[in-house]
Image (tube, coloured by chain):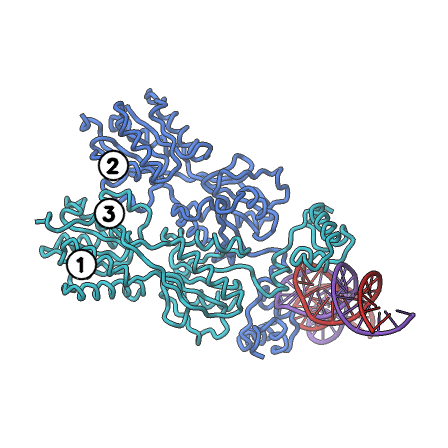
Chain colours: A blue, B cyan, C purple, D red
Amino acid sequence: MDRRTATIQDVARAAGVSTATVSRTLSNPTVVAEATQTAVLNAVRETGYRVNHLASNLRRQRTGSIIALVPNLANPFFSQIMAGISSVLTPAQYGLLIADTQSGPNPDERLAHYLRSGVADGLILFDGALSVTRKNYPKRPPIIAACEWLGADIPSVRVDNEKGAELAVRHLAELGHGAIGHVTGPRGNVLAKARLNGFEVAMRCRGLEVRQDWVIEGDFSMDSGALAARRWLSSDDRPTALFFSSDEMAIGFMGAVQHAGFDVPQDVSVVGFDNIEVVEHLTPTLTTIRQPRTEIGMRAAELLLGMIDAGVSDCTSEVIAVKLIQRGSTHSPAKNS
Amino acid sequence: MDRRTATIQDVARAAGVSTATVSRTLSNPTVVAEATQTAVLNAVRETGYRVNHLASNLRRQRTGSIIALVPNLANPFFSQIMAGISSVLTPAQYGLLIADTQSGPNPDERLAHYLRSGVADGLILFDGALSVTRKNYPKRPPIIAACEWLGADIPSVRVDNEKGAELAVRHLAELGHGAIGHVTGPRGNVLAKARLNGFEVAMRCRGLEVRQDWVIEGDFSMDSGALAARRWLSSDDRPTALFFSSDEMAIGFMGAVQHAGFDVPQDVSVVGFDNIEVVEHLTPTLTTIRQPRTEIGMRAAELLLGMIDAGVSDCTSEVIAVKLIQRGSTHSPAKNS
DNA sequence: CGCGGCCATGTAATCGTTTGCATGAAGGTT
DNA sequence: AACCTTCATGCAAACGATTACATGGCCGCG
């Protein structure tokens, strides 16, 4: 009798009631008499019964899990967001499935698969490159876009990227910089666009020139920051300050110019974006725009659960505030001369 | 008729066959006649049918997913391992569930829950602090311990930690260092123990003294590396080289001593452990022991799938080789004087 | 021609829950 | 006393797939 795991039938038999009563005791105790409840609970204990989520979910027409689609799982940027998501999902009895959209051959195909396969009750999307519109999937499960949003069609949680860029420019301008460059994220990425846009607007607001040769395309990675450094090093008409669309690029840049014998912030001021953990242990520490990643994850999960509970597939988007954290990588350009 | 998602019944009706034939066409095509197959496949296309994994798994008495228990999801160390796991699981049609063991109140309780609830077909365990033995859960699903293994009872995938420590000591000794310290991981952590042990053995092999006041307890985090730096700075009898049980601690240490005006490797040589991506963009770049994290994840997933397929709950453990990557943070102590 | 075997397919039981509906007892109202 | 509520519980039909077993047609061989 101990061969297999106990089913609700075993419990019913042990308690001398029907399976319906057992089920009710477990999921909606108010409707069953107190004496019966204790009998059932004792039987549950005796048999070591655990509900079979598969069967339960099949009957209830849900899956009990949320899937997060991440462009690149190896990117540590997401791990903290995942932690935020998990901290909301776990108490709500939802499982967290994760999938890498870039690992397979066709990301859009993968997304479509997840949307239609009904493998999850909801979806958190981190990859702005994918295309989801209401039209494509009229009866899709609730989706929320986190970080990289996809236009008005999909509700999203994101930080105020334009504002972040503006804070960076303001900070550098206040230090006295006029020759400010920008290293962007990958072309087509919405975050990158928003930050670039914020950068340009903020520059013009202050009457500063946006020089196209000082706007360098990167891809958020450290290596692309190092690449930008090579370009900076080989030029003889250099900006005195650079704003990077990610901390990782800023790190790559600083490393490369330092290895080439230059000093930050003596020779060039650097502002990053994200405030990843490592930046305060660098030399110099990195001035950056803080993105509260745990909070982003938590809010995304909360909004998604809200939609699932309400049975809707839409909700109002949310914009989370950013702030500038001043550290050692920025300095007045006066010292540069 | 488009109200709900199509079921196997709808396909059967459309193709003029029974559900059994549809099921067979999809999962075991060899047994069904070619003409019937094409009819079924057409019907599948017409109806837009997708198999309901819940129902399928319920019937087949499996869940189709693997759960990874991670001590702290926010730790980027794991994200690359997750990517490795995912790259193996996805083609094998398994989902990857992740759960944070530290976020809840009682980690051991959580583990027990996952083991018994049958929510996954297998489990990858990253938290060496949890206690799983065959006795506790005689009929548990296959488990594999990754990185932090749990004694002989559980099969594991891990790197050769002792060897890594030995490589670090050898490298420093060959540079001429005799006064070598070590910053460990958290007390009780098996990785930390193995590396400490490897460190001590390697030191003694070379006739070098292991000074207890030069063995500092850390917890793998950057902050604890910075803490170790404070201790190093306040002493006047300092080791000329330090081996850290994680790159993060090494980074925290380097940052703190640099901020205090010291130079690495001029004043102290530093060796880390892990080879996380950022270390080659630091100034100086960090000499470290490489752990192939994607590979660890992949092997763990492969071994687990192997056990599941074979229906066993045991397999031979695997030890993955490490190697030392020499960079700029280590130098002969001759220059120190 | 009859029989055995093979092949393709259908029938129906099964996986373990949840839940709409029916039932019957108890108690209250007229 | 007849009737209506209310309450606790049981019955049995789903949920949507898989698969052991049964069936019937066809072919080949003696």
Q: Position of residue A331 (x, y in %)?
A: 22, 32
Count the marks. 3
Instruction: Return the residue found at the far left.
Output: B337
What residue is disc 1 on?
Answer: B181
Tell me which amino acid carries mark 3: Arg
Residue B327: image tag = 3
Residue A18: tell me if it is visible: yes
- Taking the spot 42% from the left edge, 73% from the top edge, the residue there is B133
Q: Position of residue B75 (x, y in %)?
A: 36, 53
Q: Are marks 1 and 2 in contact (CB under 8 Å)?
A: no
Above-or-below relation of A205 to A106: above
Between A1 and A310, the one nearer to me in the picture: A1
What residue is disc 2 on?
Answer: A329
Give the spatial CA distance, label 2 vs label 3: 24 Å
- Taking the spot 49% from the left edge, 38% from the top edge, the residue there is A128
- The residue tagged with tag 1: helix, strand or loop? strand
- The residue tagged with tag 2: helix, strand or loop? loop
Above-or-below relation of B24 to D1: above
Above-or-below relation of B42 to B204: above
Q: Position of residue A20 (x, y in %)?
A: 65, 68
Tell me which amino acid carries mark 1: Gly
Decide: few, some or many residues near mark 1? Use Cα within 10 Å; few <14, some 14-19, many ≥20: many
In the rendered structure, the residue with mark 1 lies on which chain?
Answer: B
Between B127 and A288, the one nearer to me in the picture: B127
